[in-house]
Image (spheres, grey):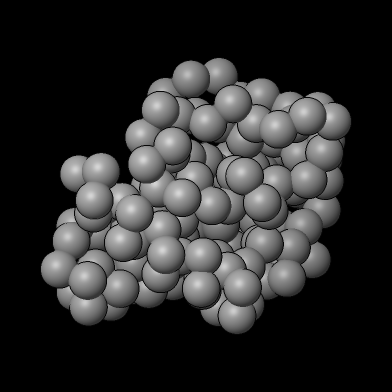
Amino acid sequence: MTRKLLMIAAGAAVALATGFSFIAPASAQSSGVAAAMSAGTVGEQADGYLGVAGSVGADVRSEVEAINIKRRAAYTQLAGQRGVTVQDVAAATGCQTLSSRVKQGQVYRIGAGAWQTKGAGAIELPSYCANAG
């Protein structure tokens, strides 16, 4: 899995650098999601998807679901190109997103753990992220 994550992370890093929308910050996707992210009620997760961390309206919940559907489609396409699982692509992208896209004050979640708020320092990433880039 280590070698796979390195390959996937390279693809995710290129996608991040070139601004593919499926891993761009959700704030670029919707003002409602951007406001929810600023309020700490929507955040990024280590699995590569957005999650609802608090009380949000049905419109924001629907937009989060739509973003996640688009992400899964992009992960599926990249997984097919790389010969790896969708979960591996999503996790590698999650590592990249948590390390470079989550801003101070935004919430994030590692695994099934509690939602955390990013402080001034780096996010403590899951151990598999060390192999992802």
Q: Residue at x 42, y 64 (%)?
A: 10
Residue 96 locus on image (x, y percent)? 54, 52
Q: Is residue 130 left or right of residue 54?
A: left
Residue 58 visible: no
Seen in the picture, residue 58 relative to 79 is either above or below; the reply is above
Q: Residue at x 66, y 24 (%)?
A: 116
Residue at the outermost left position:
83
Q: Is residue 79 left or right of residue 41?
A: left
Residue 63 locus on image (x, y percent)? 58, 63
Seen in the picture, residue 15 relative to 38 is either above or below; the reply is below
Q: Quadrant where the N terminus lies? A: top left
User: Which quarter of the figure has residue 27?
Assistant: bottom right
Residue 111 locus on image (x, y percent)? 42, 28
User: Which quarter of the figure has residue 104?
Assistant: top right
Residue 46 visible: yes
Q: Nearer the viewer, residue 42 or 61?
A: 42
Residue 106 locus on image (x, y percent)? 76, 39
Badge count? 0
Q: Residue at x 28, y 77 (%)?
A: 77
